[in-house]
Image: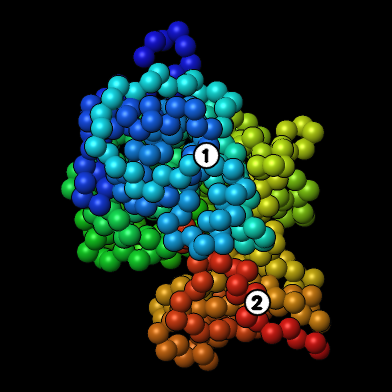
Amino acid sequence: MRADRTPGLLPALQEGRARIEVAGQRLEGDDLTGAVGALARSLAGARRVAVVAHPSVATVVAVAGVLTAGATAVPVHPAAGAPERAHILRDAEVDLVLDEPALTDRAAPPPEPAADAAPALILYTSGSTGPPKGVVIPRRAIAASLDALVALWQWTPDDVLAHALPLSHVHGLVFGVLGPLRIGSPLVHTGRYLVPVPGASVYFGVPALWGSMGAADLGRLAAARLLVSGADRLPRAVAERVRRLSGHRILNRYAMTETLVIASPRAADLRAGLPAGSVGHPVPGMRVRLADPDAQGAGEVQVRGSGLFSGYLGSGPAVDEDGWFGTGDLGEWLPDGSLRLLGRKDTDLIKSGGYRVGAGEVEDALLAHPAVAEAAVIGVPDARLGQRVAAWIVADRPDRAALAAFLAARLAPYKLPQEIHVVEALPRTALGKVHKGRLAAESPRRTG
């Protein structure tokens, strides 16, 4: 790779230094580069290519081939329903669809385009508030975000990354696949569940995966260097359990599809410890401000910088006149200058009887009870209070009176849930986030 030009997105792949293993199938070195090269050359002239993102080697080669060809990849979750898939293909106006392409040919890859403003990916949002929207992510944003993580996490080609994340979202695809192909860090995808991998030094997961790991498996992560969580709020009970059983503090970073990584601790910060709930400081190249802070200093997180998307497909830029993007997340600055997230403005800030209640605080109190395995809290309409606090829990035959007393000892009276629903499972998105919009539809409106 010449030093006098902007490097492409995937230098380790171009130079034959990458290795991937997915579902027990391995491809590495010149064989991986040759497979990507052959596919890239077959896509000459394509503008946008949809990739059905199975957890497979073929999916990794397909995405890398599209990017190497200079086209835009449009990942589609393999479990997407027919209406959602049809919407994505129509909205993105794709030229063709790759679904587990054959990898029988090998060819030298064409020179990879520079990491510039050209779109690399169109990632579709979950569509929880309407039809999924295409988020256009430029090549330079991916390069800048990954390079920031390399510095903060001390991520090197000597690391072996293991994860079980979907390959149609930022965490699993950008950080979990393009990161290794850029850096030269071998990747092992473990399938549906996150499990220990011999020799792995870095693990990526979401709170639902970390929370579902058994005690024995967590104990086997003691030899790892770094455990990373993202995509959703990390409950304190999950973080404490992982630390107790594995010996590691989880690095909890903050990212969005529209912004890539916004804030992250440094790997070195974990040894000294971080304030509860901290997601670290803004990463190099990203600026953060809190808009319209309230009396307690909490405001909407707004960002601008090198990791920002180009806009929503068909809608143009989604920033204000000064380039700031409103995330819809609530945050506050901690005394050490790091950021703590308080939840989403529309679901996690509950205004009840003139008080402000953070859903996360109530969820943490519920999860501290030994019978409660999962918890989700929202505000639901109430004619008298404006909103009342409602909770959904996955629990093993809870004693409601004992649970109420347990919460009363930990929460102010106005923060106590006024209704608690015991369910077998919480509704989740494909990435494992609790789908709170579905919970709201389950709670009856009180008229007086």
Check disc 1: other Cα within 10 Å, few if <14, some if 14-19, many if 20+.
few
Location of residue 170 in the rendering, given as x and y in whole percent from the top left corner = 48, 45
Q: Secondary structure at mark 2?
A: helix
Where is mark 2, residue-wise? Answer: 441
Is residue 15 depicted above or below 286 in this figure? above
Q: Is residue 262 visible?
A: no
* Disc sitting over residue 95 in the figure: 1
Q: Quadrant of residue 43?
A: top left
Q: Is residue 23 above or below residue 378?
A: above
Single out the residue that lies furthest toward the top: 4
Q: State the count of labels.
A: 2
Residue at 60%, 72% (x, y): give it: 438
Q: Which residue: 68% across, 52% down?
A: 328
51 left or right, relative to 133: left
Residue 20 in the image: x percent, y percent? 27, 39
Compare residues 285 and 129 and report the one nearer the observer. 129
Residue at (50%, 67%) from the top-left corner? 428
Q: Earlier in the sequence, mark 1 or mark 2?
A: 1
Specify the amino acid type for callout 1.
Asp
Hey, what amino acid is under mark 2? Ala
Query: Neighbour class for label 2 at 10 Å: few (<14), some, many (≥20)?
Result: few
Vertical placement of 31 versus 240: above or below?
above
Q: Which mark is residue 200?
A: none
Distance from the alpha carbon under mark 1 to that under mark 2: 38 Å
Q: Is residue 107 left or right of residue 168?
A: left
Q: Position of residue 444 (x, y in %)?
A: 69, 85
Q: Is residue 160 left or right of residue 418?
A: left
- The quarter of the rendered structure image containing the C terminus is bottom right
Name above or below for residue 78 compared with residue 257: below
Residue 22 horizontal side relative to residue 145, left or right:
left
